[in-house]
Amino acid sequence: MLRSLLACALPVMVAACAQGLDRHMATPPDLARVIGTSGSAVVSISASSDGRSYLGQAPPGPAFGDIRIRWSQRAYSGAYSPLDNTQKVLGGNGSGFIFSQAGLILTCAHVVESAMFVRVKLPDRREFDATVVGSDLRSDIAVLRIQGDHLPVVTIGDSSRVRAGNWVVAIGAPYGFQNSASFGIVSAVRRTITAGSAAIPLIQSDVAVNPGSSGGPLFNANGEVIGVNTHIFTLTGGFQGLSFAIPINPAMRIAQQLVASSHVKRGHLGVGVQDVDHDLAEAFGLPAVAGALIDLVEPDSPAAQAGVKVGDVIVQIGDARVADAMALAMAVSDLLPGSKTRLQLVRNGVPQAIAVVIGAPPSLAFPASPVQSDAVGANVPELKVRRLAASEAYASGISGGVLVEQARGSARRAGILPGDVILAVNGIAVTTAAQLHSAMATTDTKAALLVLRGDVRTYIPVDTSQHSDFRQHEFRQPGFFESAI
């Protein structure tokens, strides 16, 4: 009987799959229409420092200003920076698109970085010398201007409406092959791969994008630009199914500032933040796994002046809910220096509201404050720690903490390692072993330890119950969980 049922069910399943495949194959957009109507405004860009044009050809030496590439050895180490593109050679190719009849072109900042001469070629074979209106390396957005008549322009879409599974088309000049088109689907949105405070959540797709495509548009099925192609992840140097685009909404906001004043104004709060996971939410008594956890407050920063403290969890800024660290970073960045807003936060399990005046990003780092040495060598349960010497604290740029010499049991299983510096427990600063022991003793189930490893800070939840299943906490690199804003 079971065999008969399976035999009957199999044709039904196959038929259902076939019908689903038919529907899937019927959904791609009219690519010829999208490419034909939108591709005319996509340009090739030659950027050089010697006055020569490399349009339609490979530049001498390694590529300059091409798509950003992630190399395998650094990707495997987990310590790569997507801003690694340090070679400066004579010239290189990129892409861009005309978004205004005034001859304004949007592209990536790394395409024209350090270039003295920029040349633009349209699909109709017209060529123009271009001037750089403004360039913002932090967001990797630049605006060029050309002088011409009857220029084609793209239609700007709304990247906030992009969803995983949407069809997308990329047009650019990979390896100098102008107006090359490829298509695929959106793999993910709000993908964070950029280290440091400049991160913008990117659109990930499986569209074929290769060197020379940087700055080219990513179109939706309606032929509207919803992204600017900027990165690929590869183990070989070529496309491997992972391409990333800057969403057009923040890209256009930055472009408008560049056109107006040639530079970008950003807000600055003066905090380091990280995402909240389940264990940290439990340790801090949060009602939900959401918000941005403060792991650093810069001295004399807007946050410090407003009373923000390490261990606070910001859940709302102004009228916008804060889902994670990136959401807070983007919200602060969009505010102008001098503007006022309110932060809704949770401190020691109690909701609070704090008014803050947004500042401007500092140009200089704050100096470290020397500390006085104290007795060293003490034991707390499962941790052997000692107070940092003054020279150690000064070299690390911190005012105090305890150095882990040995970690056992739940602390080691949670991810605490010898050499780590514990700065706080559940938001309470610790500078001696006695303070660490006292703070750990007040927790029933989990304690959130603020740990400094190298130059990276993160909270690590440690299970303090006697009987528990231990879980390794991943000590991630900045940019994947952390942002300074």
Image (cartoon, rainbow, N blue to C red):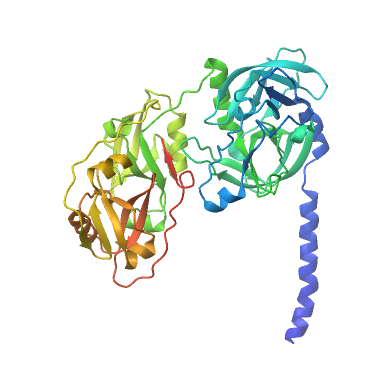
> In this image, 239 relative to 379: left or right?
right
Quarter of the figure with the N terminus = bottom right
Q: Position of residue 226 (x, y in %)?
A: 65, 35
Residue 321 visible in the picture: no
Q: Position of residue 394 (x, y in %)?
A: 28, 39
Q: Is 351 placed above or below 122 here?
A: below
Viewer-side residue, 158 vs 214: 214
Residue drawn at (54%, 17%) of the image: 262
Q: Quadrant of residue 382?
A: bottom left
Q: Is 149 placed above or below 411 here?
A: above
Residue 274 visible in the picture: yes
Viewer-side residue, 15 vs 308: 308
Numbered circles on residues, count: 0
Q: Is 430 placed above or below 362 here?
A: below
> In this image, 361 relative to 349: left or right?
right
> In this image, 245 relative to 393: left or right?
right
Q: Position of residue 432 (x, y in %)?
A: 20, 52
**Farthest bottom residue?**
1
Residue drawn at (78%, 18%) of the image: 127
Q: Position of residue 293 (x, y in %)?
A: 37, 46
Quarter of the figure with the C terminus = top left
Viewer-side residue, 152 vs 18: 152
Residue drawn at (68%, 34%) of the image: 62
